Amino acid sequence: MAAAVHARLPQAASDPRLIVPLDLPTPGEARAMVEALGEAVSFYKIGLELFATGGGMDLARALKAEGKDVFLDWKLHDIPTTVQRAAQVLAESGCDLLTVHGEPQVMDAAVRGRGRSGLKILAVTVMTSLTDADLAEMGYGADVRALVERRIHQALHAGCDGVIASPHEAALARAIGGKDFLVVTPGVRPDWSAKNDQARATTPAEALAAGASHIVCGRPITAANDPRAAAQRVVLEMSAVQ
């Protein structure tokens, strides 16, 4: 069945707006996934799971050497000196995107650390797994939308290149940040996939239409019987929104 689906899909080129997370237990499994996806994907996210293996940065450098774009989803969150030094080291890797938590001191430090490199800093506004009730339980006095809005303004003031925001806040981020501001949206789930732990998910086309510059789509692709066919299916859906 997977082969039949694969055969029916147009052999579209990868879409640079699609970021696939390599949330796999080992670098070897991540490398196998990259090979399985082939030319269907050109942009990869490397997160904490691979970072913890000790091989995450080696894989990131290898992907860059192969012409891929790489998003380091480290979500840095520490005292300013530590964040600045970490961002400086990561800037030397040649990778494209780095996440930090959207707190003013953290964002300021990351921007200083990346210096004149091409590394773009993205501020995490509110995790896409969180709801208004979750924020209240954590002690915040604002709902999700109000907190996201505040952190977008703070990210701009700090000199960040963009934010991580759910598809539901993508239009808000685009309106505040302007046309060149990066709005990277996780929590993207095609209609044909499960929502998993994403409390505020939308489809790829909906996220792009709302103002996202990039979408992060993981398990619908990486957990599919045919990851390449699933990626092509997502790219086909994205092609309807320019």
Image (spheres, helix red, strand yellow):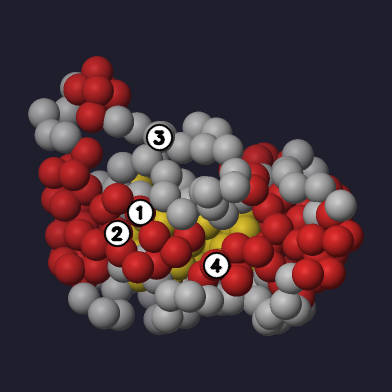
- Above/below status of 55 relative to 5: above
Q: Position of residue 215 (x, y in %)?
A: 48, 61
Residue under label 1: 167
Q: CA distance from mark 3 to mark 4?
A: 22 Å
In this picture, residue 230 sits left or right of residue 143: right
Quadrant housing the C terminus: bottom left
Q: Amino acid at mark 4?
A: Glu
Determine which residue is flagged by label 4: 237
Any part of residue 41 in sight: yes
Type of amino acid under label 1: Pro
Say which residue appears at 52% left-offset and 38% top-offset.
195
* Tag 1–tag 4 contact (CB < 8 Å): no
The dot on residue 199 is: 3
Question: Which of the two discs, 3 and 4, sits closer to the camera?
Answer: 4
Q: CA distance from mark 1 to mark 3?
A: 11 Å
Q: Residues within 10 Å of mark 2 (few under 14, many from 20)?
A: many
Mark 1 and mark 3 lie on one chain; the one further toward the N terminus is: 1
Residue at the spot 69% in from the left edge and 67% down from the top edge: 232
